[in-house]
Image (cartoon, rainbow, N blue to C red):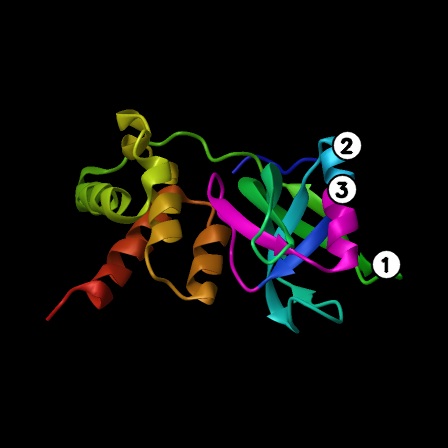
């Protein structure tokens, strides 16, 4: 993997879920610190970091975030039926948190190193089965990916992240797949996980 970028400071949003690159995630915003964060991101055109919670909860006291997360950019706003703000974010670059501090209002801010995007890498022939599995998953449960170009399925990074997004994995498994920097190794781990989902 190429060297990470110089550190930047971004707001962090620890969640009980993992955001993967290019994946979409709907969020319900109700705490003042996160309403202010969303407003600032909308004004400045910036993003915020989504990190899996290692200790603590999404609401209340600042939680302990995982060291590797994903930059989230807001793609849509709406008012939910319960009157709360709903946003839709898309995952961007992965990053590693090098330093973290909590503001007086409880919002975490992290100094992070953005990771470069994974270079396009063809899917090795021994993982062709995974391409067919993803096609079936997209057809049945992921309409947002039905218009993906055929060539995307031939890219090991994209294939691995989409499988990690759509398979019913545990948060710790998904976090490990996020942290891997070798797209072929990610496919190998996904292949080894698959028997768990096969009907006897």
Q: Which quadrant, please, contains the C terminus?
A: bottom left
In the rendered structure, the answer to whether residue 141 lies left or right of residue 200 reads right
**How far across and how far down the image is residue 77, in percent?**
61, 40
Q: Earlier in the sequence, mark 1 or mark 3?
A: 3
Q: Which residue is mark 3?
A: 39
At horizontal 60% and vertical 58% (from top left) the residue drawn is: 82
**Residue 103: percent from left, percent from top:** 86, 58
Which residue, as the protein is rendered here, is positioned at the far right?
104
Q: Are marks 1 and 3 in contact (CB under 8 Å)?
A: no
Residue corresponding to mark 1: 103
Q: Secondary structure at mark 3?
A: helix
Label 2 and label 3: CA atoms lie apart by 9 Å
* Magenta stretch holds residue 174: no
Tally the marks: 3
Q: Which residues are the magenta region?
A: 16-38
Mark 2 residue crowding within 10 angstroms, few (<14) / some (14–19) / many (20+): few
Position of residue 148 measured from the top left corner of the image (x, y, whole percent): 33, 30
Which mark, by number, is residue 83?
A: none
- Residue 163 vertical placement versus 17 (above, below): above
Disc number placed over residue 44 in the picture, else none: 2
Q: Quadrant of the rendered structure where residue 62 is?
A: bottom right
Q: Would residue 43 appear left or right of 132 to someone viewing this image?
A: right
- Give the residue at x 35% y 52%: 166
Q: Are marks 2 and 3 in contact (CB under 8 Å)?
A: no
Secondary structure beneath label 2: helix
Label 1 crowd (10 A; few <14 / some 14-19 / many >=20): few
Q: Would residue 122 be seen by someone viewing this image from the given angle?
A: no
Q: Are marks 2 and 1 in contact (CB under 8 Å)?
A: no
Q: How far across and down, in percent of the image, does residue 48 sit? A: 68, 45
Q: Position of 13 compared to 101: left or right?
A: left
User: Of tags 1 and 3, which is closer to the observer?
Assistant: 3
**Mark 2 or mark 3, which is nearer to you?**
3
């Amino acid at each position: 993997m190429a060297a990470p970028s110089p550190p930047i400071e971004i707001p962090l949003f620890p969640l009980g879920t993992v955001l993967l690159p290019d994946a979409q995630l709907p969020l319900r915003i109700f705490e003042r610190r996160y309403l202010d964060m969303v407003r600032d991101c909308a004004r400045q055109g910036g993003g915020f970091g989504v990190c899996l919670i290692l200790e603590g909860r999404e609401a209340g006291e600042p939680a302990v975030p995982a060291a590797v997360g994903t930059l989230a950019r807001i793609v849509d706003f709406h008012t939910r039926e319960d009157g709360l703000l709903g946003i839709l974010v898309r995952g961007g670059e992965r990053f590693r948190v090098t330093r973290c501090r909590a503001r007086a209002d409880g919002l975490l801010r992290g100094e992070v190193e953005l990771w470069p995007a994974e270079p396009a890498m063809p899917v090795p022939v021994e993982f062709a089965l995974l391409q067919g599995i993803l096609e079936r998953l997209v057809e049945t449960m992921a309409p947002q990916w039905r218009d993906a170009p055929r060539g995307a399925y031939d890219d090991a990074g994209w294939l691995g992240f989409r499988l990690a997004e759509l398979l019913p994995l545990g948060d710790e498994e998904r976090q490990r797949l996020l942290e891997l920097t070798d797209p072929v190794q990610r496919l190998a781990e996904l292949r080894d996980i698959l028997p768990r989902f096969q009907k006897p």
